[in-house]
Image (tube, helix red, strand yellow):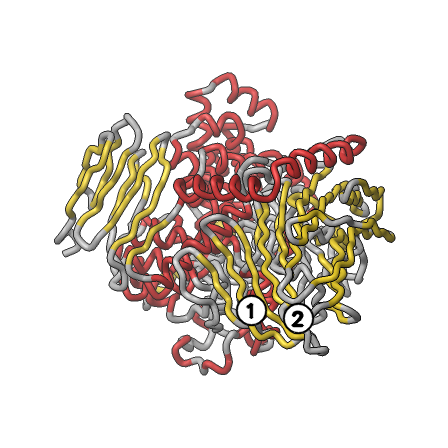
Amino acid sequence: MKNYIKADEWNIIEEGFDPHLNKISESLFSIGNGRMGQRANFEESYSGETLQGNYVAGVYYPDKTRVGWWKNGYPEYFAKVLNATNWIGIHIQIGEETLDLNTCKVTEFKRVLNMKEGTLSRSFRAELKSGKIIEVEAVRFCSIADDEVAALHYRLSAINFDGEVKLTSFLDGDVKNQDSNYDEKFWDLVTQEQDQNTDYLVLRTKKTEFDVCTVSRTTLLKNGEKQTLNAVSKDKYLGQEASLLLKQGESVDLYKIAANLSSQNYDKQQLLAEAKQRIGMASEKGFSQLLKEQAEAWAKKWEEGDIVIEGDIAAQQAIRFNIFQLNQTYTGKDARLNIGPKGFTGEKYGGSTYWDTEAYCIPFYLSVAPQEVAKNLLVYRYKQLGKAIENAAKLGFKDGAALYPMVTMNGEECHNEWEITFEEIHRNGAIAFAIFNYIRYTGDESYLAKYGLEVLIGIARFWKQRVNWSADKNKFVMLGVTGPNEYENNINNNWYTNKLAAWCLKYTITAAAKVKEQAPEQYLEIIRKTGLQETTEFQDWTSVAEQMYYPYDQKSDVFLQQDGFLDKEQVLVKDLPASERPLNQKWSWDRILRSCFIKQADVLQGMYFFEDEFDLETLRRNFNFYESRTVHESSLSPCVHSILAAKLNDEEKAYEFYLRTARLDLDDYNNDTEDGLHITSMAGTWMSVVEGFAGMRVRNGQLNFQPFLPENWNAFSFSIGFRGVQLKVRITATEISILNNSDQELQIVIFNQVYPVPHGEKVISYKGALA
């Protein structure tokens, strides 16, 4: 665990430069706006360890899968969001020396991510080998007010010398992904052009043929006077440069306004013209106005979705960092986009869509964004239903059965590990549960007729075909699967997967009945479109759901993660030497698979989804059994454990797991932050506070709360939107106050007691309720 980020309520602060931490910081200080993002690479040259990254949403390359063997149904490629044109670049030559923090003596260094206003700033003082000392102050941002625009201001000062300084502000499209399977570069040049201190570089992805035009306009000032810039160019590289004489104490200011435009949103033939118009409009506003708009847009974001923690700076910093990165990753404006596990902060996992979106991100966006945002995440899957049916057909499933991919950009499966691609099929259930969760929260049952029921039918058909009848058990079983715990592969009857499949089958029948009653004409159209055989298919689905087999151990009275789980040597995590963790970095895969250790919530994931089916004692037995065997080496694990611990009134564990999930990246718990941040698990951090400590649930169309206050906190508060009403909730050790900003009265349930909450603030005491 690292501990070098300074505690601050609104800022992520790094003081002092340690090159061994640089790639971690590049991830932590990333900026984005839902349409594009940028790792915290230095503007100037850096020859040390770095992962260069500028990413444009939805633009990807199908990198050919690299394996030593092949199986039927195996995906031919792994889709990767690409490292695109480097727009931040500034090459600085001081006399004969290049400014490079890897070769300089860095005497002062500070990097600050201002989460309140959405900016990254950096300042440093460096001594070159010649003894010359320079000072730099830089600030940059990706605008969420105009999500195709970004800007930076770079000030360089001569501290102890008079001399020539040469600055080159450039666009560099000759880039590649570090995770390229065959060390291939993925971009071809379409055109490049320069005019009036402005560079235009249009590149096209190989195979997928996305065009991206990156444009930047550079302004250079010395003593407030604009300096003349000279254009320089080579293949896939354009720049604006100037040589200046700086006297000791003098500074030069470089402003760079940039934009990324994609052929996803513009006709290729008009892309360059659109880029010229966009850079003209942004430049007319200027850096200061763009910065002002950025701060105003972020103020609105925080008004909608901030969590305030009183009395615990580390926890406050952590939750805001997680909310900030989620808002930088996805804004919900475009239903073609989704949430990659690393967002715009790194290349690992390819930047593609996983089941994380439905299982972890939907609750966050339901509560802190307009309803359309979460809806777009579901529509994304609806539009890929045809591909999901194709994916299932490749594996031998028939008659409209749908298997959604483990990893995708366009709906096709592109994951390149067989035990996950073929076996981690619980992702289908997470998508179905997200439909249920969306409707439960919003009350928007019309979604079933428009989109949801077709998806549910395809998923139900898959589950029906994926099980088989066991004469030995006299039950339906599901063989050869991998559950959420990826430290178990190719096992039989994963409890969570079986439970989710049976629930999906029953829910699809219920959903069909609702559509038939509420929208009969649309229902007939869905039957025609899907070929649904109501009587026979519903009977089959009911039969499977009611006769599903669930592994269970009578002696310990717990649900078994899978058949044979107790055949493993039962060692507890507390007995593992610290030197052997994390297991995935210290043990062989064979040893991990034979151990009882669990990567993340598996049985407990199912108990979290379907908590109302289990009494507290059942939950407690299973929680104690599985948590003691869980190493939490998935970023998705601590949040589920935190929520369940809170439900069990285990406040110490709830807080312990919250802090771990909240500061997972800030403290680099799993030694992998340098690859990029764990964006989807950040939604789980929000859930730990709102569903865990506040105990918020939606039951029977009403918000329910069962709150408690962590010992380290004085109070906490959060904003949520619920069915057209915006609420501000504040919780102390003895009371909950709810501010209703709408004219609509809500019924709120607190510890099973119903309270009306009209317009205005209502304070409800719950002292003694826990007892």
- The amino acid beneath tag 2 is Leu
Q: Nearer the viewer, residue 175 or 126?
A: 126
Q: Position of residue 246 (x, y in %)?
A: 70, 62
Q: Is residue 227 left or right of residue 672?
A: right
Quick check: 535 above or below 749?
above
Q: Residue at x 85, y 51 (%)?
A: 233
Q: Nearer the viewer, residue 703 or 314?
A: 314
Q: Position of residue 677 (x, y in %)?
A: 55, 59
- The tag earlier along the polypeptide, 2 or 1, is 2
| SS class, disc 2 | loop
Q: Is residue 451 visible?
A: yes
Q: Position of residue 722 (x, y in %)?
A: 35, 35
Q: Is residue 76 visible?
A: no
The part of the image, by quadrant, that contains residue 705 is top left
The residue under label 1 is 109
Q: Position of residue 313 (x, y in %)?
A: 35, 62
Q: Residue at x 51, y 49 (%)?
A: 118
Quick check: 347 above or below 672?
above
Quick check: 682 above or below 388?
below
- The amino acid beneath tag 1 is Phe
The residue under label 2 is 101
Q: Is residue 115 left or right of residue 92?
A: left
Callout count: 2
